[in-house]
Image (spheres, grey):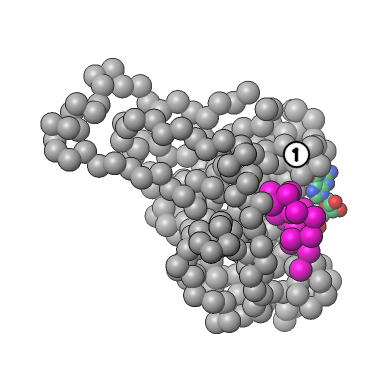
Amino acid sequence: MANYIASEIMTNTSATPQQTPVADPSDKVVLGWTHTARFLTTASELVHLPPNELPEIAFVGRSNAGKSTAINTLAQQKRLAFASKTPGRTQHINLFELGPKDAADAWFADLPGYGYAAVAKAAKLRWQKVMADYLGTRRSLSGVVLMVDSRLGLTELDKQLLEFVTPRVRNGEIKLLVLLTKSDKLNRKEADAALFATQDFLGGIVTEESDVSVTLFSALKKKGVEDVARALHEWAHPKAQPAAETAEDAEEAEPADAAPPAPAAAS
Ligand code: GDP
């Protein structure tokens, strides 16, 4: 597999206690999970969004960034995120449910694409308010996937959007994954430069508590699909962190020559 979650470099791992490694779920498990995504409901205003106790993962990005294609590719469904393209629905938040039918375990929220030049100013302002409110106040929001065209990199609008959510990313309340989409259009050197520039910007957001990452993604070449599905699966099913019961246990659990956790394989 040629792709990697490049930002494992930036992801804070220092707070993770040494523990018996838990095997990562297989590609089949994580892709099987994203495949369960099904349309739940749509809302044009925040107050109309149903309350949610499950982890909610929001997908955001400029129009044309490849958001619908990425969601459909992750879910391995042709028309799942099609609703957000339907005239009249483009300014809506579309919700999808994941997990077993009788025991959903996460929601995906597909947020309106932004930056479309032809949108009137009033509509743009309305969008800003919906996004700022959603990203700043939605309690169930546990992760944000920002889709950025890898040829453009983070634009001013993307940075503005990130500002809405930065306080909650910095305190670890919300995880952030940036997908550099359509990476099939870049050669290796350009792809490295895109990763570097994005990491450089995100470096200003990262804290001890935060979980911030960036990866190349191509729906066309199916690059990064398993890695992203795994990251989202992990967000929705965080591994239990067994706490050492006593100080002695803690000492026993920590080998004297403990090495820091290995970064994810970059192959
Ligand atoms: P959205 O507005 O963000 O939902 O963007 P779309 O998913 O509709 O994609 C916008 C355009 O980019 C479409 O023409 C897609 O076919 C194209 N696109 C999306 N993903 C990829 C990709 O991985 N590679 C390439 N080459 N084109 C892509």
| Residue positioned most to the top | 257
For the image shown, how many numbered marks are present on the structure? 1
Q: Quadrant of the C terminus?
A: top right
Q: Tell me if I can see residue 18 in this picture.
A: yes
Please tell me which residue is depicted at 34% across the width and 39% down the height of the picture: 15
Main SS, magenta residues: helix
Against 103, residue 147 (above or below) is above
Q: Quadrant of the N terminus?
A: top right
Residue 168 in percent (x, y) is at 45, 59
Q: Residues within 10 Å of mark 1 (few under 14, many from 20)?
A: some
Q: Is residue 103 left or right of residue 229?
A: left
Please tell me which residue is depicted at 39% across the width and 30% down the height of the picture: 21
Q: Tell me if I can see residue 228 in this picture.
A: no
Front residue of 126 and 266: 266
Residue 183 in percent (x, y) is at 76, 39
The boundaries of the magenta stretch are 65-83
Residue 206 in percent (x, y) is at 46, 46
Query: Which quarter of the figure has residue 117?
Result: bottom right
Against 241, residue 170 (above or below) is below
Against 42, residue 28 (above or below) is above
Please tell me which residue is depicted at 29% across the width and 41% down the height of the picture: 242
Residue 81 in percent (x, y) is at 74, 61
Name the kind of residue labelled 1 in the image: Lys
Which residue carries the number 1 mark?
222
Any magenta on residue 208? no
Against 122, residue 83 (above or below) is above
Any magenta on residue 81? yes
Front residue of 98 and 3: 98
Please tell me which residue is depicted at 76% across the width and 72% down the height of the picture: 90
Q: Is residue 159 left or right of residue 172?
A: right
